[in-house]
Image (tube, grey):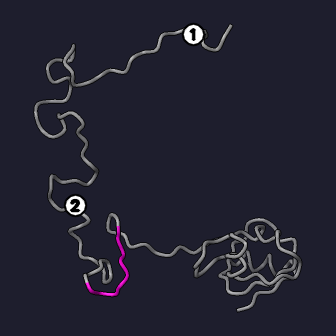
Amino acid sequence: MQLNTIKPNTDRKRAKRVGRGGKRGTYSGKGTKGQKSRAGSSVKPGFRGGDNRLWQLFPKSRGASKKPGSNRPHHRHRFYQMHRDKTASFNVDAFNRFKEDSRITLDLLIKEGMIAKGAKAAKVLGHGELKKKLEFEGFLFSASAKEKIEKAGGTIIG
């Protein structure tokens, strides 16, 4: 037996080609005329026949678009949503990888590749166990995370 001689037990079923006559009548289930009856038709979500999309009708927030000659940053928004920087979050057990008595800062997490460059804030959550004495600086903490850090002998600065 060779690989090129292997055949499946069942024949492959051909996909139905809609819109080409046949037993479905002249229009083949696509109705008569109009944009959606044509070959290759696709209407993007939110398209209203050339009218403004719904989210384009809302008033824009200040700084939402860049005017020619202005030095404000260009904020494009999709579906009328401004992008906000999300706070990175970590559970306390994620810090067991660091050495005992290390000082944990945002810069250290960026250097380790745990968060993206330019991150402005991170929050420590209390899931898991912290097995090392560490010093934390410049984070937000949940109540259970604070408790677990102090229980392990660690300290929180600022």
- Give yes or no for contact between labels 1 and 2 (Cβ–Cβ under 8 Å): no
Q: Residue furthest bottom?
A: 158
Report which quarter residue 37 is drawn in.
top left
Under mark 1, the amino acid is: Lys
Under mark 2, the amino acid is: Arg
Question: What residue sits right under mark 1 in the picture?
Answer: 7
Question: What residue sits right under mark 2 in the picture?
Answer: 53
- The residue sitting at 26% across, 65% down in the picture is 55
Q: Quadrant of the N terminus?
A: top right
Q: Secondary structure at mark 1?
A: loop
**5 vs 144: above or below:** above
Query: Closer to the camera, 100 or 15?
Result: 15
Q: Nearer the viewer, mark 1 or mark 2?
A: 1
- The residue sitting at 76% across, 81% down in the picture is 104
- Residue 67 at what x, y percent from top left? 26, 81
- Residue 140 at what x, y percent from top left? 65, 82
- Tell me which secondary structure the magenta stretch mostly adopts: loop
Q: Residues within 10 Å of mark 2 (few under 14, many from 20)?
A: some
Query: Closer to the camera, 81 or 42?
Result: 42
- Residue 26 at what x, y percent from top left? 14, 20
- The residue sitting at 73% across, 71% down in the picture is 126
Magenta stretch contains residue 127: no
- Give the distance between the C-alpha atoms of the residues marked 1 and 2, in whole angstroms: 52 Å
Magenta-tinted stretch:
69-77
Q: Secondary structure at mark 2?
A: loop
Say whether residue 13 is left or right of residue 138. Answer: left
Q: Of marks 1 and 2, which one's residue comes earlier in the chain?
A: 1
